[in-house]
Image (tube, helix red, strand yellow):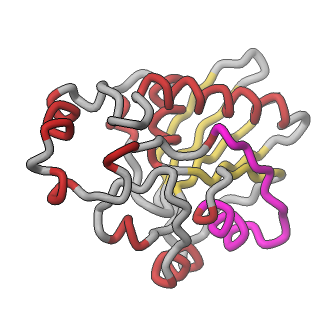
């Protein structure tokens, strides 16, 4: 039986508006972020999964008010370590930040995760999600930009950053009964 999976990035938080690295910080969405989510039409689903962070849980409850999101801890955002809560302007003179940029984002965040570590954790969460889906056909996942980039860059060809998506937007793809992923398409969810 083929399943459809939709990955949705949470609504905007104060840190998103200020272009800050917000990973493990448990920021709530702003009112503007909530309004943006309510102005869009999202696909119906049989089950909804979410990161444990408030911004994702709130987004899931706005989009799917009649469903209780299933929380999967491994779907949380990357731990940005010492860069958490800062933006590129504040970090532009930081030697560690410059080294991280020069590594193409491959180096670990000082005091945080590397992309490889975050990808492995995220894919453990994704595998857990697939096992929990059972007979459900339409699955939605409300998570983070880094989570979406990790899942898609591990399942499909393409650079990690090529799967960047704005708040409230996402991707939809299918998984066939033999476990093959296909039909990837970007979704803006605009009415």
Give x and y (percent) for residue 167.
Answer: 45, 61
Part of the protein shown in magenta: 56-74
Residue 117 left/right relative to 131: left
Check the picture and name the quadrant holding the N terminus.
top right
Task: Give the camera-side residue of 62 and 185.
Answer: 62
Residue 41 left/right relative to 167: right
Magenta span contains residue 104:
no
112 is higher (above) or lower (below) than 69: above
Give x and y (percent) for residue 118.
Answer: 50, 31
Residue 42 left/right relative to 156: right
Give x and y (percent) for residue 56.
Answer: 61, 60
Quadrant assignment, res 98: top left
Q: Residue furthest right?
A: 135
Residue in the image at 46% along x and 48% along y:
145
Residue in the image at 57% along x and 54% along y:
8
Magenta span contains residue 67:
yes
Task: Give the camera-side residue of 36 and 145.
Answer: 145
Residue in the image at 41% along x and 73% along y:
14
Residue in the image at 39% along x and 44% along y:
80
């Amino acid at each position: 039986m083929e399943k459809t999976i939709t990955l949705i990035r949470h609504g905007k938080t104060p840190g998103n508006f200020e272009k800050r690295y917000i990973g493990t910080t448990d920021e709530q969405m702003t009112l503007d972020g909530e309004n943006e989510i309510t102005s869009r039409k999202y696909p119906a689903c049989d089950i909804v999964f979410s990161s444990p962070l408030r911004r994702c849980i709130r987004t899931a409850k706005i989009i799917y008010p009649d469903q209780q999101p299933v929380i999967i801890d491994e779907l949380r955002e990357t731990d940005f370590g010492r860069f958490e809560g800062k933006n590129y302007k504040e970090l532009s003179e930081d030697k560690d930040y410059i080294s991280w940029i020069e590594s193409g984002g491959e180096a670990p965040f000082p005091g945080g995760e590397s992309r490889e570590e975050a990808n492995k954790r995220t894919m453990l969460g994704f595998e857990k999600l697939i096992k929990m889906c059972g007979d459900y056909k339409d699955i939605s996942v409300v998570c983070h930009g880094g989570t979406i980039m990790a899942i898609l860059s591990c399942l499909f060809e393409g650079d990690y950053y090529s799967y960047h998506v704005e708040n409230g937007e996402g991707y939809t793809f299918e998984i066939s009964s033999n476990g093959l992923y296909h039909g990837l398409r970007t979704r803006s969810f605009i009415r």
